[in-house]
Each structure stands twice: as structure tokens, then as C-alpha cells.
Amino acid sequence: MPLPSPLATLAASPIAWRVNARARRGPYGPRQASVLSHAAFARAKAEITRWPGYAPTPLLALPGLAKALGIGALWFKDEGKRFGLKSFKALGGAYAVLRQVQKVIAARTGIADAPSADIAAGKYRHYTKDVTVACATDGNHGRSVAWGAATFGCRCVITIHAGVSQGRADAIARYGAEVRRIKGNYDDSVRQAAEDAKANGWIIVSDTSWPGYMEIPKDVMQGYALMADEAMAQLGAERPTHLFLQAGVGGMAAAVAAHFWEAMGAARPRVVLCEPDKAACLFASVAEGRAATIAGDLDTVMAGLAAGETSPLAWEILEDCADAAMTVGDAAAGPAMQLLAAGVGSDPPVVAGESAVCTLGCLAGAMRDPAIAKALELDARSTVLLFGSEGDTDPALYETLVGRPADQVRAA
Ligand SMILES: Cc1ncc(COP(=O)(O)O)c(C=O)c1O
């Protein structure tokens, strides 16, 4: 069968790959369990699934695309439908904001774990209104933190860097957050937000960790694990042989990989980390054997993945279970988005944003090169799960890259 033309373009996009010699296939280890565990996850799940508007996001089977790629099955978890925020990030930042607000309430009233519905209804307004949560973001995490702050009644300051589009900034401001734009890249904005928070007594709710700052990013990642949990339930008894996971700082990939690993033990899926070639800090981490930092302006169209500093917490998990790392060029984003929008064969049309499709670029590249496919054990028996981590979070950019607005894609 001739390749659909965006797939031919996609498969021709340059990729790089490397195997992680440190990956192991034993049971979920204590090192990982000290970061994320099903026990701690139970609390996040009980909380988030109670929030108004909660519904599991769809898990789509894409048999047409799987066949065109040469694999047995392809599943796509569509996070574009996550709450009203259009990305999986809604699960992490907002949950971590709630946990911080609950801690403030506990410290001031002695009431531990005040119910989120009561907090959202303003019962503790007196205590929450002077709390300010803050973070740096390339868009989606800040939107989640701002949404959490608006829902749970506290103030919010979000720092963005030069490369964040105005559309993304406006989407954050719509939740009532103060948005501050700085010069520099994502990592500069993380440092600036931390400095401002220290000077003003704000609580930083970051999606990345650093030495001495680990607890809040754990909550963020524990929230992300819900999408892996939903996917496992939606798959029934089936389990993927491969997870292709996109990475910015690595928190999402770590949360998903850990959730599958803890559930499946030594039979866990192969994990392939995927990044844009301009912001490949996990790729560097695999080479260096530590949570690596890379330099540069990180200027990639896959804005959610534009991070140069690996989260040390994420690395605690990924060092042992990321079997390989790949990078793909920005040129892959448009064709991958178009391919999903058009659907192959009878596949449904899917609205996937720039950061959602990095994995499809890497998977197509791997299937084009027999040596890579063999090394990653990818063949017609493989069943691959991808996480469509965002929908059209930047609608104008989506329309530019796909050639039609998301509404038209959905209506097709
Ligand atoms: C849409 C999207 N996908 C993936 C990621 C990567 O997540 P992480 O930075 O935890 O690796 C992000 C991060 O902002 C994102 O916004």
C-alpha cells in the first residue's frame, strides 16, 4: 500500500536514537517507589476523579496508521479532551495546587485534607485568598496551575519566556493569573519564577524538580499518572509492548512509565523517550548517565517539550526503565499533525497539538530504519501506546500547521 503523503514526509524526517544501557527489566524498585507509587497515586486518583467535569479521555485505536507504519496495533490516548484545558497538564499542576492549599488550611485550622469541593465553594476563602501560587511555564503547566488557583481560591503569578506564544499567554490570563514575560528560555523562566517566589513568599508549584525541591513535583507527576491508569483500564486485559513517550523535563514520561512498570513488573513495556532535536535533555541524560542539562535557546515548535534541564525526580525513574531515547526535527510536527487530522483508512480524525506528535515522528522514523526497528524490537506484532498530550492548545498555530482549524477536523 502506498504511504499516505504526510506519512512519507514524516518518515523522511531526520531522527537520532540511542539505547540506554542502564535500563533493566526487573520489578519496580525502591528507588522508583520513593518517587511515585500506586499507594500515593490512589489519593490523587480519588481526588481528581471527583472534580466537576472529570471524565476519562478517549483511548483511540488507529489500525489504519498501525498498518501503514508496519506495527500490529497503535493506541492513542487523546488528552486534548482533558477537562477544558486541552492537555494532560490539567491533571498535575491543579492537583499540586490543591495539595498546597490543603496544607495551608491544615496549618491554620488544624483541618487535614479539607475536601476540595468545600475549598472550591469558598468555605476556606478566608485562609486561601492570601496564598499565591507561582510557576514558570511554556504554556500548559501554567494553564493548569492558573486553573487550580482559580478553582481553589488563591492568587497566581505565572512566568513565561520569550518563546511562549501570545495565544498561550492569553489562555493562562483568562483564569485570572498575572502573567509575566521574561527574556530568555524556559530554564531562565524557571529560575526567575523561583527567585520571585522567594522574594514574595509565594508557593512555587513547578512541574520540574531540583535539589531541595522535590515534594510538589511529585504531586504533579502523581496527578499525571491518572492518564496511564485510565489507559490501562481502557485496554482491558491487553498491554502495550511499547510506550513512546514525549519529554520536556521528563515528568510525564516518568509518571506513565512508572505506572505501567509498577503494574506489570518485569513484563513492563519497552519505553522509548522522544524529544525535539532542539531540546533533547533526556537524550543527553541517557548518554551521560545522569539528569543532564543542555544549552541553547531550545527554540522548537513543540513548545511543551522546550526544556533543557532534566527533572532529577523523573530521572530517578527513567534511568532504569527508559530503554531508548530518540529525537526528531521540528519538520516532523506539521506532517504528523496532518496525518492524525486526516486519519489513515477508517481511523477517526484526531486533533493533536505540536507536542503531542513528537512520538509519532520518532515511531515513523524508527519503522523506516530496519536497524532501529530491530534494536527496539518493533515489528508487525508490536502494540504501541502513544499519549496525545495536547489538542489545539494554540489554535492559531494548529490551523497554520494543519491547514484547517481544529473544529473542521473534528467535524470531518
Ligand atoms: C503538551 C505537552 N506534552 C508533553 C509535555 C512534557 O512533559 P514533561 O515536561 O513533564 O516532560 C509537556 C510539558 O509541558 C506538554 O505541555
Image (cartoon, rainbow, N blue to C red):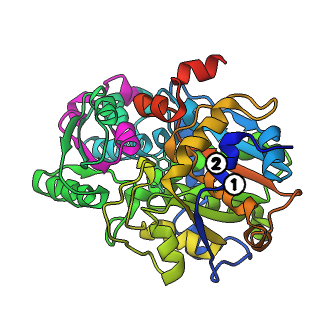
Which of 162 and 232 lies nearest the eye of the viewer? 162
The image quadrant of residue 215 is bottom left
Can residue 182 be found in the magenta stretch?
Answer: no
Residue depicted at x 47% and y 80%:
290
x and y percent of residue 198 in the render? Answer: 15, 58
Q: Is mark 2 within 8 Å of ligand 1?
A: no
Which of 82 and 68 lies nearest the eye of the viewer? 68
Residue depicted at x 52% and y 28%:
403
- Which residue does the numbered mark 2 point to in the structure image? 9
SS for callout 1: helix
Label 2 CA crowd tier, 10 Å (few <14, some 14–19, many 20+): some
Label 1 CA crowd tier, 10 Å (few <14, some 14–19, many 20+): many
Q: Residue furthest left?
A: 199
Residue depicted at x 27% and y 57%:
185
x and y percent of residue 346 in the render? Answer: 81, 29
Quadrant of the drawing holding the N terminus: top right
Compared with residue 150, is residue 75 higher up or lower down, i.e. above or below? below
Residue 56 visible to the viewer: no
Residue 41 visible to the viewer: yes
SS for callout 2: helix
Whether residue 291 sits left or right of residue 152 in the image: it is right
Which of 125 and 319 lies nearest the eye of the viewer? 319
Q: Are dots 2 and 1 in contact, CB under 8 Å?
A: no
Can residue 138 be found in the magenta stretch?
Answer: yes
Q: Which mark is residue 364?
A: 1
Type of amino acid under label 1: Ala
Question: In the image, which residues are magenta?
Answer: 118-145
Type of amino acid under label 2: Thr
Calculate the distance from the C-alpha at mark 2 to the C-alpha at mark 1: 10 Å
x and y percent of residue 327 in the render? Answer: 55, 63
Whether residue 317 sits left or right of residue 120 in the image: it is right
